[in-house]
Amino acid sequence: MADLSILIPARNEEFLTRTIEDILSHREGDTEVIAVLDGYAADLPEDPRLKIIRNPEAKGQRAATNQAARLSEAKYVMKCDAHCAFDQGFDIKMLAAFKEVGDDVTMVPVMRNLHAFNWVCPDGHVRYQSPSGPCKECGKPAEKDVVWIPKTNPQSDSYCFDQEPHFQYFRDFRRRPEYKKALATGLTESMSIQGSCFMLTRDKYWELGISDETFGSWGSQGIEVACKTWLSGGRVLVNHQTWYAHMFRTQGGDFGFPYENPGSKVQAAKKTARELFFDNKWEKQVRPLSWLLEKFWPVPGWSEEAFAKLKAWPLQNERAARAEDVEPLPEPQAPTEAVPAPSEPRDPKRVPSMGILYYTDNELDEKIQRVCQRQLEKIARRKRLPLVSVSLKPTAFGRNVVLPLKRSYITLFKQILVGLETLGTDVVFLAEHDVLYHPSHFDFVPPREDVFYYDSNYWFLRASDGFAIQYNVSPLSGLVACRRALLNHFRERVALVEKEGFSYRIGFEPMTHGRIKWEHWYGFETYQSAAPSIDIKHGKNLTRARWSQDQFRRKPAFWKEATVDTIPGWDNVRKLLDLQGAT
């Protein structure tokens, strides 16, 4: 069984044989080619590494690609056009990159232009590849001279699409710091792809429905592949360690697209892309398209108005992402939009969108988890707040994202970061799995975008005996702030902990101390909700609890004690938690 199957849908392709020979001569791994002769006949080379599907009538490019994928048994598949050339060892270079980054990726090589042929007349006049016809200079008949030269300039490695949507080269992205930093690793991210060559696992190909025939035979394939990869939780990467060269046919006649391709079908494919991705109706997505725009913003061909309109569309499903659907965390990067300076308060006339980010390690007592979730779910429903949950196991709560990680401090920070990238609202309330939140906690609207706000009206309840305490505290579970500011910080926090490991010097509550000189610094303030929330201590908390003042190195400014029955603002906690033996 091959490691890689290269899928080539072909319709009246003059250079199919040359493309196959190029692949087989430059492959260095266990790679096979599956070619589909879609409605035409051709003499192809005999080779044990070549499989051929012959369709008496044309089915279309997407359908033919799916035929080839069904015949494959390889772990990875690469779709490529039937007029391409390749780098020596391109296959093993691509496979090596997948080993480095994992399989939740669609990857493309750097794209060069393929100079396949010239037209040459008897007088020696040469015309670059184009439709057939007599010599433009002397009028004499011209013959085709196949040269098959992968040009070294240009070399394309960044792509996007505009608000139509229409494919665009994204040259400006190459000047950004995040691109330059990633380039040193040999792998850069791209918002979209060109579509003539891409590689992913065969399982992911089918899971995401990569060649959806409802788009039509051809059109918007690069947008389809990129959006399905990014919005399901994956990444689109360009491998700078290798390349392929593609022959472009845009001049019509006998040097045009071989499939029937009327403008109406092109527009139909774009309409399908808009309905699925712009309106966030694709059933497998865990991120809105606005998330992808924000990640690469500014993007050519997108106005601020179109971007704002896109952000207003909610996700249309509540799908729980599986572990393999979750994006490996990005490198920390500069914010795509400046956070207002401390002297600039939020515009009081504009009401920001608010959302809840819930995170859990799935080790909480089931009874406590159920009570806390029901309370939070009721609040989210009544206040119409979108709720994203990030867990370590599948959890039927809000829009769930699952991270395949073990419980740890760095995992906690990564969960928050992934949740922030998924949620998409202006303001985010952090919500921990073992806190019984009071509805008034979510009435607060941050007046500034450059300040981290903590609800300090908290009681800590010991589940074993019902003992409760309150003291001056600014807990992570009570944090609410502008999502952009939180993104900036948690990207930086994750990078620091990955580099140096966690220490209590870093701490848990951002901006509450000055021990770390963060690149992005924000203000810190507390507020008091009308009634307290209750942090339940149950023996499996990630952070330790202290139950007497002498356990504190620095004594709390105030200290109150109570029982499960006397916590202000709550008269049903004992019943909710079924604390029969509590005092």
Image (cartoon, rainbow, N blue to C red):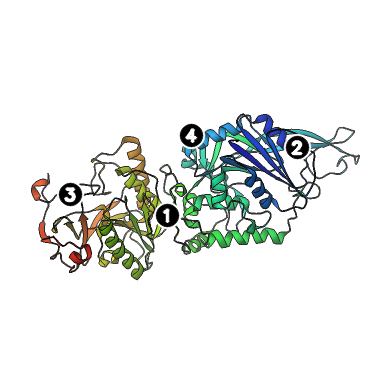
Q: Is residue 518 visible?
A: no
Q: Are marks 3 and 2 in contact (CB under 8 Å)?
A: no
Cα distance, mark 4 to mark 1? 26 Å
Which labelled disc corresponds to residue 545? 3
Q: Which of these two is toward me, 120 or 396?
A: 396
Cα distance, mark 1 to mark 3? 31 Å
Residue 357 found in image quarter:
bottom left
What is the secondary structure assignment of the residue under circle 4?
Answer: loop
Locate the C terminus by quadrant: bottom left
Q: Are marks 2 and 1 in contact (CB under 8 Å)?
A: no
Which labelled disc corresponds to residue 185? 4
Label 1: how many Cα within 10 Å (few below 14, some 14–19, many 20+): many
Residue 197 found in image quarter:
top right
Q: Are marks 3 and 4 in contact (CB under 8 Å)?
A: no
Q: Nearer the viewer, mark 4 or mark 1?
A: 1
- With respect to residue 28, does 386 lie above or below? below
Residue 248 at x, y percent in the picture: 71, 44
In the rendered structure, which disc, 4 or 1, sits on the residue that comes first in sequence? 4
Amino acid at circle 4: Thr
Q: How many marks?
A: 4
Q: Is residue 142 visible?
A: yes
Residue 53 at x, y percent in the picture: 72, 44
Residue 61 at x, y percent in the picture: 69, 51
What is the secondary structure assignment of the residue under circle 1?
Answer: helix
Q: Nearer the viewer, mark 2 or mark 4?
A: 2
- With respect to residue 36, does 435 lie above or below? below
In the rendered structure, which disc, 2 or 4, sits on the residue that comes first in sequence? 2
In the rendered structure, which disc, 1 or 3, sits on the residue that comes first in sequence? 1
Residue, disc 2: 17
Amino acid at circle 1: Thr
Residue, disc 1: 422
Q: Nearer the viewer, mark 2 or mark 1?
A: 2
